[in-house]
Image: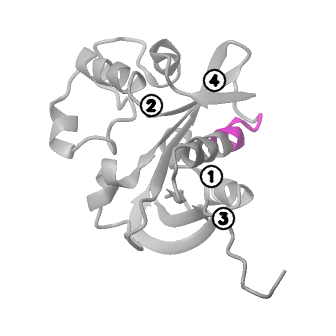
Amino acid sequence: MDVRPATVFDDVRAVIGPQNPTANVCWCLSYRIPSRRNRDLRGPARGALVEELCAADPPPGVLAHDGAEPVGWAAIAPRAETTFARNRKIPRLDDLPVWSLWCIRVRPGHRGRGISHALIDGAVAFAREHGAPVVEAYPLDNRGATVDRTMAYAGLRPNFEAAGFTHAADTTSTLAGHPRVLMRLDLRPARVTPGRR
């Protein structure tokens, strides 16, 4: 599985775009842009904005490819550039310029192959390459309960734990009836105490 920056709009559209270009689907914009703009942006204008984001530096996330076929998506960006910067339900823990990883999507027909794990790892690598000191995620703490796949975009706590993230805080946010937790992965070099090896 090859995970790389989401710079090719057609590949992003294949994973998160609508079959009908006039449909008002999320396009993974609901946490990326202010609520009012998200409500006002309709139909093809949503895809046009995502196309602009794909041409920006950094692009809006990463894509997993199986050969040439795009099969998964993860949205990641500096928290300060998302609506999480002002989210009252998901706490801000400190002043570090953390990056937020908030959406993981695997195309139907490709699930159950570890793609979500590859996307988390690829998103972390992408954030590290862009200087992120810490990556945050806000997955569902479903405790083994079944989650509606359309609402599992935030990811599941065990998948982030498997990638080395640790529980940093509880939140008052819920999704599909499950609480969301704030998980963190520190990317800063380990500090060595003087006189110890």
Judging from the image, what secondary structure is the residue with disc 4 in? strand
x, y (%) of residue 21? 33, 11
- Could you say which is closer to the camera, residue 101 or residue 95? 95
Mark 2 vs 1, N-terminal side: 2
- Report the amino acid beneath label 2: Pro
Judging from the image, what secondary structure is the residue with disc 1 in? loop
The residue to which callout 3 is attached is: 189
Spatial CA distance of label 2 from label 1 is 32 Å
The residue to which callout 4 is attached is: 71
The residue to which callout 2 is attached is: 59
Q: Is residue 41 above or below residue 20?
A: below
Circle number at residue 146:
1
Quadrant of the image containing the C terminus: bottom right
Spatial CA distance of label 3 from label 4 is 32 Å
Question: Residue 20 sits in which quadrant?
Answer: top left
Mark 3 vs 2, N-terminal side: 2
Mark 4 vs 2, N-terminal side: 2
- Report the amino acid beneath label 4: Val
Task: Report the magenta residues as a range.
Answer: 113-119
